[in-house]
Amino acid sequence: MDIFSFYMPTRLFFGNGAVKKLARARLPEGRGLIITGGTSTTRLGYVQKVADALAQAGHETLVYNKVQPNPTIEGVRECAALCRAEQISFVVGLGGGSSIDTAKAVAIMATNDGDWWDYIHGGSGGGKRMEKDGLPIVAIPTTAGTGTEADPFTVITNGEEKIGGGGEKCFPAISIVDPDFMMTVPPHLTAYQGFDAFFHAAEGYLATTANPMSEMFSLKAIELIDRSLPAAVADGSNADARADVALANTLAGFVETLSSCSGEHAIEHALSAYHPELPHGAGLIIISRAYWSRFCECAGDRLIAIARALGRKDADKPEDFLDALTELQQRCKVDDLRLSGYGVQPEEFEKIADNAVGTMGGLFRVDPRPLSREEIVGIIADSYR
């Protein structure tokens, strides 16, 4: 058996009402900055619940509420400047992955010199090493998709580059996964986010970096998503289904930490870098069949195992996975999505493929076999209509 490592310094609280644990959380003295986006977390009372729990622990809080769905380097810079000016002691990422990823980047910028992009490896990033620990991070997801509460990574957009970054210093100190905060996500977003979690788990199982521990988390996450994502999409008030999908998402975050995403994520990041209106999970759904079909001959056993985790206990050929994937998409009513519906144009295919390789080419290196530039362009073309 090859050597593998497991490092997970995050204290995780999971379950309905878990946000109350913040009242006893060990955080440094001083003010916290709640980093969130839009109006829903405020309108639904989540910001106030977090602020109240921290107040019980003696912490005053400020709120930054300008995070965009695809968080930008400009937003990170603005929030980090506020963090330094107000002498913030810890940050709270409250919302979807965008808010938590912003909080991670801000926490590093608050204590390290330079700009977040200086610490990005890939594209135009500076490739520097983070010298100092960031501020403590509290991650409180209100969606079940990114798994960022259980991994040390971020995804930030800088112009036409949407690149994952991070490292050990970006692990949250505390993560609160409270399914009560996820009950109002609309059906289509529930599906998109759930498939993001699914592909984190499945790609981590497919990747050459998979190991016995990541495989355990992968298969359990896939099983939970197959069992409960369609139910959560059909009825957002189904508390048991919401909890299953939330747990699957966190387990898939462990997979990201232990293994890796693969080339599928690199392609989608390039797509949504050029077309921010394309939700990340929707993009993954759209390119999934074209991407996964490229590995039927070289990773058949892996695809069969995923098919069985998707409920096809008699699966015996890799094509069974493609059928199971299509069926899950049909059950979640997202099987008719296409790139042409989000403004992607055929003349962009090669540019998008080059962006994927140039910004996140490392993910292609963990695919079961190398994908040529022509194959990457072909995946995009096959997903167009």
Image (tube, rainbow, N blue to C red):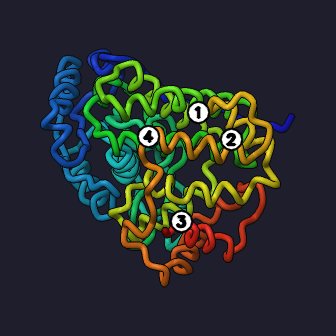
- Image point (38%, 26%), residue name: 242
Left/right placement of residue 108 relative to residue 198 reads left
Confirm or deny contact between disc 1 and disc 4 (CB under 8 A). Answer: no
Direction left: furthest residue: 43
Q: Residues within 10 Å of mark 3 (few under 14, many from 20)?
A: some
Q: Is tag 1's residue or tag 2's residue first in the polypeptide sequence?
A: 2
Counting the numbered discs, the total is 4
| Nearest the eye: 249 or 76 | 249
The structure residue drawn at horizontal position 42% and vertical position 70%, both measured from the top left corner, is: 340
For the N terminus, give its image quadrant: top right
- Residue that label 3 marks: 383
Write down the quadrant of residue 362 in the picture.
bottom right
Type of amino acid under label 2: Tyr
Q: How far from the left and from the top, in percent, is residue 181?
A: 28, 28
Q: Amino acid under label 1?
A: Ile
Residue 222 marker: 1
- Marks 1,2: beta carbons within 8 A: yes
- Residue 382 vertical placement versus 51 (above, below): below
Query: Could you say which disc has been placed on residue 332 in the image?
Result: 4
Residue 353: x and y in percent read 57, 73
**Distance of mark 1 from mark 4, alpha carbons?**
15 Å
